[in-house]
């Protein structure tokens, strides 16, 4: 009869025989339950990230409608020029006439609305405008002001002042009353404190709803800037943008004037050089004429007096 130790050894050996013997067998075993992407990530590799494929609107011959309402897009920021309703063939001919441009479908109306433009430039201007709009319409932040239901008058004034500052900046403010332990039974005092804060900030804030409980130990209400505050912020922002644009235009004007002045100075220098060159040429021509006159005088004297060695030595 085999001993107890031998029986345990046989059982353990039989159990370990079902385990994989190598790393490759381990992955082949796991791959039955995991996808290829998950297995690749499990091995430590990077997950596959698909590229963002651009979805182009129907253009040119891809447009199925027989009649379209056509406009010519302005890439200089001006208003688009409407050409009216015309057939698809006429619209394509017009696009070709304007410089081999594209006929782009922008709205599936009745009839569909198309624009004539260079698609690459049109896409660039559209993306630029979207970025500017996103930048201009930046979402306001939500600030938080915490206090206790038994807050001191001075501390309450500090919290109220902070809330006013956040609201004047155009941010929403979440006012929170925090309780500790048995203080939660005094939630009525917390509601009264929030109602008091809403009333005192009523000139610049609007409550998004009545104060409510967030669990057993928190009361909260959210205040948003009033329309007057938002209008004032928009006005200030427009003034800042206007001042920036004015400064930019003035800088461009100054640079243009400096460039024109430089060109004028260069033109004056070139004109002076040309005048000096003409004067030198005139002087050289006059000197040449004087030399020619001297030669004529000498030839006339030779003709009058005759030419011999004695005369030549006399007038030499």
Image (cartoon, rainbow, N blue to C red):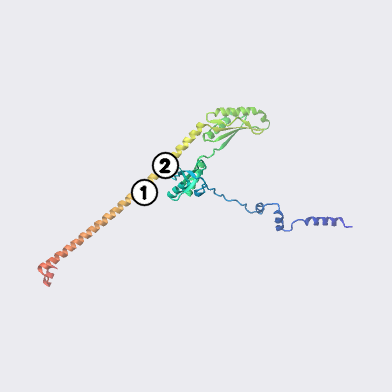
Which disc, if any, is residue 138?
none
Q: Secondary structure at mark 2?
A: helix
Q: Position of residue 52 (x, y in %)?
A: 56, 49
Q: Position of residue 266 (x, y in %)?
A: 32, 52
Q: Which residue is mark 2?
A: 247
Q: CA distance from mark 2 to mark 1?
A: 18 Å
Q: Residues within 10 Å of mark 1 (few under 14, many from 20)?
A: few
Q: Secondary structure at mark 1?
A: helix
**Relative to 40, is 69 above or below?**
above
Q: Earlier in the sequence, mark 2 or mark 1?
A: 2
In the figure, residue 248 lies in which quadrant?
top left
Spot the residue most to the bottom: 309
Q: Along the line of sight, which residue is nearer the eye, 71 or 302?
A: 71
Q: Along the line of sight, which residue is nearer the eye, 86 or 225?
A: 86
Q: Which image quarter holds the C terminus?
A: bottom left
Is residue 256 shown left or right of residue 271?
right
Q: Which image quarter holds the N terminus?
A: bottom right
In the figure, residue 282 lies in which quadrant?
bottom left
> Disc count in the image?
2
Q: Residue at x 67, y 30 (%)?
A: 184
Q: Residue at x 28, y 55 (%)?
A: 274
Q: Which residue is mark 1?
A: 259
Q: Residue at x 85, y 56 (%)?
A: 7
Q: Along the line of sight, which residue is nearer the eye, 226 or 37?
A: 37
Q: Is residue 121 visible?
A: no
Q: Position of residue 78 (x, y in %)?
A: 43, 42
Q: Residue at x 11, y 71 (%)?
A: 310
Q: Position of residue 200 (x, y in %)?
A: 55, 28
**Relative to 95, is 1 above or below?**
below
**Relative to 122, is 197 above or below?**
above
């Amino acid at each position: 009869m085999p001993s107890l130790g031998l029986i345990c050894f046989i059982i353990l050996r039989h159990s370990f025989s079902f385990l994989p013997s190598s790393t490759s067998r381990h992955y082949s075993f796991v791959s039955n339950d995991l996808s290829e992407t998950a297995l690749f990530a499990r091995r430590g590799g990077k997950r596959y990230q698909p590229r963002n494929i651009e979805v182009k609107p129907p253009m040119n011959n891809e447009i199925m409608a027989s009649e379209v309402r056509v406009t010519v897009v302005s890439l200089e920021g001006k208003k688009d020029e409407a050409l009216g309703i015309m057939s698809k063939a006429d619209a394509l001919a017009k696009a070709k006439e304007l410089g081999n441009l594209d006929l782009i479908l922008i709205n599936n109306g009745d009839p569909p609305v198309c624009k004539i433009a260079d698609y690459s430039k049109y896409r660039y201007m559209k993306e630029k405008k979207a970025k500017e709009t996103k930048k201009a319409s930046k979402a306001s932040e939500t600030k938080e002001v915490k206090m206790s239901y038994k807050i001191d008058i001075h501390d309450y004034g500090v919290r109220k002042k902070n809330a006013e500052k956040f609201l004047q900046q155009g941010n929403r403010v979440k006012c929170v009353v925090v309780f500790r332990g048995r203080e939660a039974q005094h939630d009525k005092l917390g509601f009264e404190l929030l109602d008091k804060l809403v009333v005192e900030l009523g000139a610049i804030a609007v409550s998004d709803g009545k104060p409510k409980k967030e669990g057993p130990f928190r009361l909260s209400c959210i205040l948003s800037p009033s329309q007057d505050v938002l209008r004032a912020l928009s006005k200030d922002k427009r003034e800042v943008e206007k001042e920036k644009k004015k400064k930019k235009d003035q800088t461009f004007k100054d640079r243009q004037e400096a460039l024109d002045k430089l060109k004028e100075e260069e033109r004056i220098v070139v004109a002076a050089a040309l005048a000096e060159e003409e004067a030198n040429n005139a002087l050289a021509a006059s000197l040449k004429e004087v030399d020619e006159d001297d030669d004529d005088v000498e030839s006339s004297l030779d003709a009058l007096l005759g030419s011999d060695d004695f005369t030549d030595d006399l007038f030499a």
